[in-house]
Image (cartoon, rainbow, N blue to C red):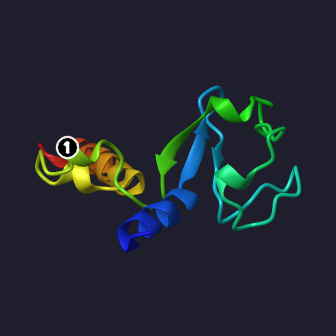
Amino acid sequence: MSEQAEEALETQALDRYECRACGYVYEPQKGDDKYDIPAGTAFAELPINWKCPVCTAKKVAFANIGPAGTASGFKENLGYGLGVNKLTPAQKNILIFGALALGFLFFISLYGLQ
């Protein structure tokens, strides 16, 4: 097997999966305490009868959302925009709520004008 194929398999094993029914995210690094799944267990290695610990949806209801800490969206689109497409979801939250807080501070500062 080529090195690139091995790397793709290894990356696939560490991907997180999100339940399309309730939004629960299975993270292989944490495992699942409810069903006694140890940390480091890839989604593909989960038992067939494993279900979402929140809404009891089956495994087929989960979608691959990639590894933690990566930019959201399609890889083809990451080069467009003003660099915002390369931000992780946490960085986007900081940018959005930081801008809202700054706008609120500017608005409040208008009360100081006479």
Q: Which of 108 and 31 is in front in this view?
A: 31
How many callouts does the rendering have? 1
Q: Is residue 106 in view from this perspective?
A: no
Residue located farthest toward the front when viewing the structure as drawn: 1
Q: Nearer the viewer, residue 43 or 69?
A: 43
Would you name the residue on which mark 1 appears? 77
| Kind of residue sitting beneath label 1 | Asn
Q: Where is residue 77 in the image (x, y as percent from the top left)?
A: 20, 43
Which element is circle 1 on? helix
Residue at (75% x, 31% y) in the render: 58
Q: Which of 106 and 70 is in front in this view?
A: 70
Left or right: 70 with respect to 75?
A: right
Residue located farthest toward the top when viewing the structure as drawn: 21
Residue at (27% x, 44% y) in the render: 108
Place residue 71 in its image quadrant. Answer: bottom left
Place residue 100 in its image quadrant. Answer: top left
Left or right: 44 with respect to 55?
A: left
- Quadrant (top left, top right, bottom left, bottom right) of the C terminus: top left
Q: Where is residue 95 in the image (x, y as percent from the top left)?
A: 29, 52
Q: Where is residue 55 in the image (x, y as percent from the top left)?
A: 77, 30
- Quadrant (top left, top right, bottom left, bottom right) of the N terminus: bottom left
Q: Answer few, some or many: residues within 10 Å of disc 1's Cα (few below 14, many 20 plus, some between 14 and 19).
A: few
Q: Nearer the viewer, residue 83 or 46?
A: 46
Q: Is residue 31 in view from this perspective?
A: yes
Residue at (38% x, 49% y) in the render: 93
Residue at (48% x, 63% y) in the render: 11
Left or right: 101 with respect to 112?
A: right
